[in-house]
Image (cartoon, rainbow, N blue to C red):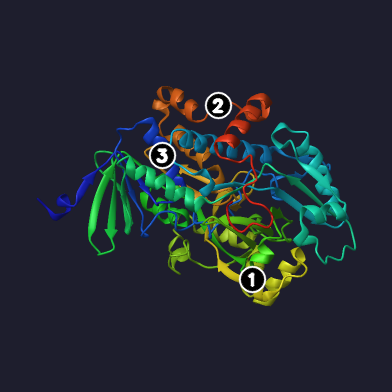
Amino acid sequence: MSNRENNKTNTDVILIGAGIMSATLGTLLKELVPDWKITVFEKLDKAGEESSNEWNNAGTGHSALCELNYTVEKADGSIDISKAVKINEQFQVSRQFWSYLVNRNLIRNPQDFIMPLPHMSLVQGETNVAFLKKRFKALSDHPLFQGMEFSDDPIKLKEWIPLIMQDRKVSGPIAATKIDSGTDVNFGALTRMLFDHLKNKNVDVNYKHKVDNIKRTSDGLWEVKVRNDKGEIEYCTAKFIFIGGGGGSLPLLQKTGIPESKHIGGFPVSGLFLVCNNPEVVAQHHAKVYGKAAVGAPPMSVPHLDTRFINNKKTLLFGPFAGFSPKFLKTGSNLDLLASVKPNNVLTMLAAGAKNIPLTKYLIQQVLLSKEKRIKELQEFVPNAKSEDWDIVVAGQRVQVIKDTAEGGKGTLQFGTEVVSAADGSIAALLGASPGASTAVHVMLEVIKKCFPERLKAWEPKIKEMIPSYGVALAENPELFQKIHTSTAETLGLNGKRFGHRNQSIS
């Protein structure tokens, strides 16, 4: 028997990358078909270390409560809230699934990954205040956004956001919206919890295993070539593969050679946050406050001042400052971008480059910012911020999808999350970025729908048990939304304020 045959294993499902997406898909499949054999390959030494890590993402629990780029002002001046509604619904799906897991003791201590926290939007200037007022009107009439408040009174704002309003010279209009049903989600902690659960369910999780190649075998299976940290090569075959390797997904998708992988490129964007190291300052702020993106900035660069809960400690982050690195992962190679250019996507990539000169210029400017300049930007939010109270932390790498679209033409830069799958559903990859992790359950249900259509009917009762609103638009069923929102808040412990303004640790 050849050496290759000795190092060959067979499994039902291969998950590449131990991030929130693979964790979610693996957990869903284990509930739907407990006897399927699932194998995970992760190149790092533990789960949730790249894009899912708590220091590498905003942890907003994106539910479009405060992100202004999800509500667009149309030419006639009205506000289009359809994207905000869609993202909010998708986050409710995540909440339902997490509640199901907590109720069945499959994961415990939800406070270790999700905390209640007000979500706010803050704007200055006449035009922006007029926009926020219209946005508030459009959203607060909607059942999914009930409880949203608006104020343009500096005294009220001082009550809501004392740190931001302290010593602020208010020379023109200023306004904010606030909704108390927001959350902070630690996706790193959740990912690690889900992988602990999967290990208990006999899922074979292999850390320090890098997938070098993926190819189709003559019998229609997929084979991955895997290298461990000792340089030893193994082969593993499966009927179904999910590539959930964050920025590393695109190069692996290209290796599959499926027609759907052609004419797709990736544009890496890196980020930095300022993190407050002064507990007294941290104690004065208790919200996620989103502003408006600078002209020419990518949507994921919307400035925000976030209360975060990391390792059961309250912290304060400001950012993100966008940057550029040719790496597709934080632990990637400087050749990643160059290596992703293929004969089938070179024109798409060149077209994107030509179209996005302002974005490239913006990213270069951001890379060159000194700490002093970053602190100056922070002072727009926190007027009396002091440089010595803040440290710089490098956030995760995001790879935005570039593809040819009917609306945008050749080389359109996509801001969002995208699933690419083979026509026969035997392989799927997740590309893109925000709102990513927050909508992981919805996105992985889409993967299941696309890749296992013949099993969907049989699986539906179980899916509905896990996600009671499955197949129903919550926006059109306010009573069901209310019921689900209340019960998930109860299960996940989101009703009581577990942190006071002044507290530094969970009481």
- Say which label, 1 or 2, has the lower sequence index: 1
- Residue situated furthest front in the rendering: 507
Q: Nearer the viewer, residue 10 or 319?
A: 319
Residue at image point 32% right, 51% down = 214
Disc 3, SS:
helix
- Callout 2: 10 Å neighbours few (<14), some, many (20+)? few
Whether residue 108 is visible, yes or no, is yes
- Mark positioned earlier in the residue sequence (3 or 1): 3
Q: Amino acid at mark 1?
A: Trp
- Residue at coordinates 71% horizontally, 54% vertically from top-left? 289
Circle nearer the viewer, 3 or 1: 1
Rendering coords of residue 290 (x, y %): 71, 54
* Relative vertical location of residue 424 with respect to residue 68 in this rendering, above or below: above
Image coordinates of residue 410 in percent, x first then y, are 59, 52
Which residue position is annotated with label 2? 471
The local crowd at label 1, few if under 14, some if 14 to 19, many if 20 or more residues have their Cα within 10 Å, is many
**Disc 3 or disc 2, which is closer to the eye?**
3
Residue drawn where x is 44% and y is 54% of the image:
48
In depth, the one of 442 and 493 nearer the eye is: 493
Q: CA distance from mark 1 to mark 2?
A: 46 Å
Q: Is residue 366 above or below residue 432?
A: below
User: 45 left or right of 155?
Assistant: left
Q: Amino acid at mark 3?
A: Thr
The answer to which quarter of the image holds residue 496 is: top right
Q: Position of residue 353 (x, y in %)?
A: 59, 62
Disc number at residue 390?
Answer: 1
Which mark, by number, is residue 27?
3
Give amino acid for label 2: Gly
